[in-house]
Each structure stands twice: as structure tokens, then as C-alpha cells.
Amino acid sequence: MKDIREDIAWAKINQDVLKSLENPRKLYWVIVFCAMAVFSVGLGCEIYQYNVGMGVANLNNPQVWGLYIATFIFWIGMSHSGTLLSAILHLMHADWRKPIYRFAEAMTTFSLMTAGLFVMVHIGRLWQFYYSLPYPNERGIWPNFQSPLLWDAMAIFTYLSSSVLFLYVGMIPDLAIVRDNIHAGWRKKLYSALSLGWEGTDRQWRNFRVTYLTIACFLIPLAVSVHSIVAGDFAMSQQPGWHVTSFPPYFVAGALYSGCAAIITLFIILRYVFRFEEYMTLPILKKTVRLTFAIAMVWTYLNAVEFASVWYSHDQASKDVLIQKATGPYAPFWWGMIFCGSVVPFMLSIKRFQTNIPVLFAVSLLLNLGMWLERWMIVAPTFSHGYYPWTWDHNQWPSMVQWGMVFASFGWFTLLFMIFCKVFPSVSMYEVKEMVYHRKLHAAKGGNNSQGAH
Amino acid sequence: MSVTNLLENWSQFRHFHPVDDKPHDPYKWAMSIDLDTCTGCNACSVACFAENNIPVVGKDKFEHGQQMHWMRIERYWDEDVSNPGGRDFPDQGAQFLPMMCQQCEAAPCETVCPVAATNHTPDGLNSQIYNRCIGSRYCSANCPFKVRYFNWYDYPTDDSVWPAEMNQQLNPDVSVRSKGVMEKCTFCVQRISAAKITAKNEGRLVHDGEIQTACQQACPTNAITFGNLVDTEARVHKQWEAQRVEIDKDKQEKDEEKGGTDLRGYRILEELRAYPSVMYLERVRESAV
């Protein structure tokens, strides 16, 4: 099976991708409408919480963080696979990433924006949010540069701005194609402005390549550091169950894992909604699935490492938290995490399922459920079972306000993502052409057609 | 944290607390609590509510764990309640532990606050700046004692904890906190400041016993002692010295002596090296009742 047919005409590629900006299937509008409805639920919850106080989230003294921070980590994690696909695989010259990296990169940007929202809804005085930013002010007051939370804020802002830049720069040649093909109107003006006068001259291409590569190289260490710093929020604290050195790699692996699972979900949706069957082919899906399986195993290993290092540390408080996770009130969720995160991925190792779309759709959702549970199981049990008995609180349950906002974040993300895919080309036209061209050269040389280029 | 601090004095944030700290001079506020005399009467807690304008949240919010008691009495039982036939709250054998902010010398809450709303004062207090707090609650997450309380609701206005006629009973020396900020025991910093100002005007140091915290004042059995640890004549200094408890110790000698000891002093969760400023004296009598 080939990653992509080598006889697709370049004009057809343009035509197919441009069609996605015009008339998607009806399902598109259904998804957008549902996403808006779901998002408005969360908006209502936030307005209520903003007016009445954080107490309506049913947070309390030991359990001060709850679902907001768990879901924040989840969305930060989601953002990592975009960079993996677009930057790391770009440097490794993996051709199969070309039709799918654009939407993965968009996913990075929008999941970061979603994560940012959770920081906002989490803090008690949203209207003083800017205190945590190092802005110049006449009083000479700065944020506390020792706080992992501040590193977090800075890392996320840097990562967000860099990935927006990366997404945009990578899109310039495509924006020019859209500019040249679209009928006059506000969209024509938008694309003309955004394509920065791209004409496709040799000099422009040369500069473009260098810029793109530079940002890719810049983005990779950034992606690793962002989630390491999020892990630092926990690992650098003193609480039992969090004070674990292996947290940063564990978090990064978890991030890539949930991101890859989300790529599979969105791959399947986009392929159907925008009629991208020709470009988002099953062999590419298969490669993504295999990559996801490999990362799932890395995550499983690091998870085991974490349990082992807690267990053999002989730190009684940390051990108690681990025992609480496995046997206490959180046990169903903890075992659910183990099942969804470490057992379900074995479905991906079965060849028959690697191209079976309904199965993959279900599995990818389960994997992400598992990864969300993982984040919750990092945050909540430590709060419920602190250093000494008075600080224990095993019965606190998040209120509907919290659940509503967690639920709504999926709507917000989907909404942004779907709007993006309708306004901008979600398949990279110029890179697909490149890929088709490579395949053609390969075929002309009499190469083995059953193998994709790299 | 100013630019000057950032550029020139950064090293002061990077040393080993409290061993390399600048010496506390002339004040280091500390406490000792004698668990042998504590009867668990809760007078300290009530006094604290009155002195520090702490909102009484009501039954519903208390059940959700949103109570605000800066000073709380923790109860523990000798009897193993998980034994078959054992009761959850037996009549006898309760032990009491008055618990408030331990004013740690190397406070875990201070380093993690993103906006530096909680700081260490030169006289050894862990201060909380309400105006600066954005409510990230990281301090509470990192506090091993869980003695920080968050304003989950707007108690003074929305909840009208103090209706119009009761506004008069608020302590004018203490600010009423708004929604979304963290608060905690201050060692009655308003009383400390007042005494320091008086002493300064009179050109002397604060005498031992000149400052009483609200909890200390209300305690019927004098279980709480508060004072200046630097002052060798202060009662709290003598108690710490007699028990061989020092600020920068992370374990007590009495735990290593075989065959019992007369020493009773310890600090809670010392092994975490937060170096609390509150010393507890172990209970020696048989039963609390």
C-alpha cells in the first residue's frame, strides 16, 4: 500500500484542498453547532463562578486544585504531538507526515489556548491575572522568579507564540495558492494580506526553507521544556506523590501519547468531513497508529518507573498516597487509567485494527480518556491524602461547575479547530505536491512501490 | 521583588534556609504550645475569629470543608477506632493539637507563589499580602500542614457574614479579606506592629510579655507561649533552650536517647525541613479527660 498515489495531478490537489474551504459535508455544521452549544455551557459556569466565588466549584482546604489543573495538564499535553509531527518528523525527513502535519500543528495551537483558559478559570482573582506576568511597572514589583508556576506561564506563552509562528510560516505558500484561486471578497483580502506577497520565486523558497527549519529547531527543545516545567509544578513541590524526579520525562511521554491519540481522532473526523480520503490515506493512519503504540509503551514503562520509585523510596507518606490511589475512593478511576492507558493500546498492535477506522476511532477516544484520568489521578489523590491525618479528605467531589467547564473545553477546542479548518487549508498543498513528486521520481527509478519514501 | 533584588541580591534567595540566613536581630517571633495543659476547649480558635475578622462560613460550607479557622484544634484518639467494636469518636482518650500557620523559616509556600504575595519578614514571620494575591492556591498545595485558608466566596458582602449591625464588632486593625485571596495565621501581626512602634518611640526593644497573641490571651490553661526567640530572657527562648529545640534542627535529640528522656519539645513534620517556628511539648499525662 502506498502512502499516496503518485499520479495525482497538482491541479487536483489544489482543487481538493480548496474545496475544504468551501463546502464540507453537513456533518461539519453539526459538529460546529454542537461545539458551540457545549462551549456555552462552560461559559455559563464560568460567569457563575466568577460572580459567586471559587467555592461553587466545591474545592476546599486540602483539595484546592481539582479538575481545572488536571484538565490544564491534559490540554498542554495534547499540544505536543503537533510539534512532534511537524518539527521532529520534519527534521527526520519522514515524508508521510506531510498531509497531516498542518492540522496537528493547528491542534497544538488551539489546545494551548484551551489550556491557557484553565489557568484563568482556576485562579481566584481573574481580574488580577496580569500580576503573574513580568511587566514593567512604576512600583518595581516583579513576579516571583522562584515559582514553578511563573516558569509555567512564561514557557506556555513562549510555546504558544512560537507554534503560532510556525503554523503561520508553514502556511504561507498555501495561502498564496488560496489567494490566487479564491473569488473576490473579504477572504481574498485576508489571504492577500497573510500570504505576504508570496510569488514562489527561487529566492523566496530558499528563505522560506531556512526560516521554517530554524523555527522547527527552535520549537523542539521548547516543546520538551514546556511539559517538563508543567511537571515541575508538581515535582518541585514537597507533597507526597508529587515529589518524584521522574515526573518530567513521564509528563512528556504522556503528552506525546495523548497528542498522538488525538491526532488519530481528528484524522478520522477530517478525512470524512472534508473528503480528504485521497490525502489522509490508510497507510499514513497506520504509521500514526504504530507511532502511538510505541509511545504508549514508553508511557507505560515510565508509569511503572514512577510507582517503583515511590514504592522503594520507603517514604511512608508517598507510599500511602500510592496505596490510596489503588484502593481508596479514587480506585475506579486509577484502574480505569491503567486499563485505558496501558491495556487498550494493545489493540493498536493488532495488524487488523491498524486501518480499521471505527475501531481506531473508539480506541483513540479511550486512550485520551485514559490520559485525562492520568492527569486527574496525579492531582487529586495527593490532595486527598496529605502528610498527616487532619489533612486527609477523601470525600470531596468536584461540583457540576467544574465538570461543566471540563466538558466545555472540548467544545471550545473543537470550535476553534473546526473554524480553522474551514478558513485555512488544513492539508499542506505544497508539501503534498512535493510528496507526490518524490513518489513519482521513486517510481520512475523502479523503486519498490510497497514502501513509502522513508 | 524589585529589579535591584533581581540583578544584585539574587544570591540571598539562593542559600540554605535557615542555616545561612541573616541573624534575626533584634526579633524572631516564635511560639511554644504545651499539649499537656491543652484541654481542647477551642477558646483560642474563638479568640482568633474575633481578633482577625475571620468569617464564620456556616454549616453548609463547613461540611464542604470550606471553613476558615486560622487556629484549629485537631483531635486524635489513642484508641484504634478501626478495631471491631471501636467507636468513631470514643468518650475518652482524645488528644488535642492546636494547629495554626507554623511560620516556617524555610516556608514551602513562599517559594512557589507566582506573584510573591507571601514573603518572609526580617522578624521571622511568614507574611501574606492580600492585595498581591491572585489566588493560584499553589501555596496551599505545597503547605504540609494545610493551614492556609482561601476565600472561596465573597464573605463580607455577598454572604454578609457581618450584617450591618455587626460591622461594629470587626477589628479595625485587621483588613477584611475579599473574594479569591489566601489568608492564614499571622501571629497577630497587628499586635506585634503596634508594640514595636510603641517600643521604638520609647527607644527600647519590645519586652517579653508585651505582646500576647489572641489565642494565647484566651487560653485558660496558659498552654501557649509567644515571644521573641532572640531575647535570652524571654519565656519562649528559655523553653526552646530547655527542650534543646533550635530553629535549624530537623530532628530532636530526645528521639535518639534510649530509655526515655525528660525532653518533650518537638516540631511537627520536622523531617521536611520547613523549620517551623512553633514548638510543641509532648503530652505526658495519661488521659485528656
Image: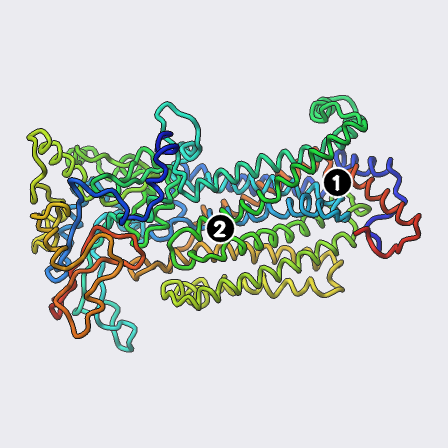
Mark 1–mark 2 distance (CA, rounded to whole Å): 33 Å
Task: Answer yes or no: is residue A52 visible.
Answer: no
Residue B133 place in picture, x, y as percent: 34, 37
> Which numbered tag is attached to residue A427?
1
Residue A435 lies in quadrant? top right
Nearest the camera: B21 or B209?
B21
Disc 1 chain ID: A
Q: Which residue is mark 2?
A: A231
A438 to the left or right of B75:
right
Disc 2 chain ID: A
**Disc nearest the viewer among 1 and 2:** 2
The vertical placement of A92 against A386, above or below, is: above
Residue B89 lies in quadrant? bottom left
Of the residues under marks 1 and 2, which one precedes in the sequence?
A: 2
Q: In the image, are marks 1 and 2 on the same chain? A: yes
> Which numbered tag is attached to residue A243?
none
Residue A33 place in picture, x, y as percent: 63, 40
Q: In the image as oriented, which residue stretches furthest toward the bottom? A: B84
